[in-house]
Image: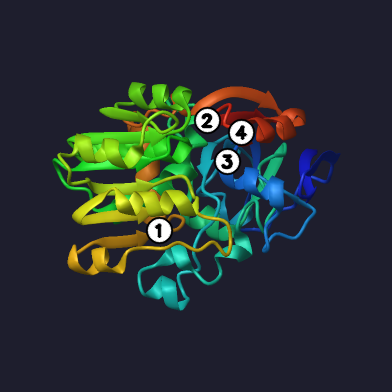
Amino acid sequence: MKAARFHAPGKIRIEDIDIPQISSEEILVKVKVALTCGTDVKMYKRGHPKVVPPITLGHEFSGTVEETGQKVANKFRVGDRVAVANSAPCNDCFFCKTGKPNLCEHLLETLIGFSVDGAYAEYIRVPAPIVRQNTYVLPENISFEEAALLEPLACAINGIDAANIGLGDTVLIVGSGPIGLIHLQLAKLKGAAKVIVTDLQPERLKIACKLGADVVIDASKEDQLSRVKEITGGLGADKVIEAVGLPQTWELAFQMTRKAGTTLFFGGCPSGAKISLDTERIHYEDLTVKGIFHHTPVSVLKAFKLISSGRFNGEPLISEEMSLSELENALIKMSKGECVKIAIKP
């Protein structure tokens, strides 16, 4: 089969490799759509300390079941259209047993696109824990493109739940990339009265408007802090979600949060990055500052239900389609901010 193999930062090669062999508890999926992701872009540009090349990247995907292991043949059948998350917890470690399966100590052991060959290929082996917990058969009305958004949507649901958005809240989303645009829709579904979105790229802000943003701020032309204060009567936003992943935007998100508000740091900064926060504000203004990581089986299930219901609009998040041979160009294009996501079709 054809697979896009990551060998080193800036080096991806399309190679012929063997179709994966599966165990009795695994399934083999023929990839129909694999979506580009900011994590893949970062890995392509600078590698990852826990990823050992060569490996096939790609962890947002959907497809059809090509083969089933003997022990899961009663759950999945050849030809089933499936959406698959990129990991699943062990349910036995300290963090799993204390209600934080997203921090499972064994997550990396079967993490698709990191320790297990990913979806930028014609076929992918789905590890047993993921088959058991985070693989779903699609209803006929859902496209492969929509289904491939299962993983990022699940992560965003985990984040939006942590933000604890209340009815009538003013929510500020810093960044209108894929994750910011997903959070925008979720904030609306949670009952936010006003959602403000900031970004440096006008084209992305146009998409945010189409998806229901009440106010957009072009950060290339306006001072975000001043504008947010103006919109909120000098208070700041009730809930602020940082969806960029840069130290300076983390600090800015904190500054734009009102007294007794919540700042959610969703975007992951480069390893070793440091930020400075005003401890006086945290203490005397009763602020909540949260980090959030990954997804859980519960958030994956919620994501699947939301996609299946048709209430989540994934279409504007996919800018175009490309072939597997064009993957490197797709990642470069995404890194330049020229698209939201690209659907790779092996």
In the rendered view, does 250 fall on the left or right side of 34?
Answer: left
- Residue 106 seen in this snapshot: yes
Q: Which mark is residue 292?
A: 1
> Residue flagged by tag 1: what amino acid is it?
Ile
Give x and y (percent) for residue 10. 77, 44
Question: Could you say which is closer to the camera, residue 152 or residue 209?
Answer: 209
The residue that appears at 47% across and 76% down in the rendered structure is 93
Mark nearer the N terminus (4 vs 2): 4
Residue at the disc numbered 4: 334
142 or 70: nearer the eye?
142
Q: In whole angstroms, how far apart are the C-alphas of marks 3 and 2?
A: 9 Å
Q: Which residue was labeled with disc 3?
A: 37
Image quarter hosting the C terminus: top right
Q: Residues within 10 Å of mark 2 (few under 14, many from 20)?
A: many
Q: Earlier in the sequence, mark 3 or mark 2?
A: 3
Q: What's the CA distance linking mark 3 and mark 4?
A: 8 Å
User: Going 41% across and 33% down the picture, which residue do you hit?
Assistant: 219
Which comes before the other along the chain, label 3 or label 4? Answer: 3
Alpha-carbon distance for marks 1 and 4?
24 Å
Badge 3 vs badge 1, beta-carbon distance below 8 Å: no
**Residue linked to disc 2:** 340
CA distance separating discs 4 and 2: 7 Å
- Secondary structure beneath label 3: loop
Q: Secondary structure at mark 1?
A: loop
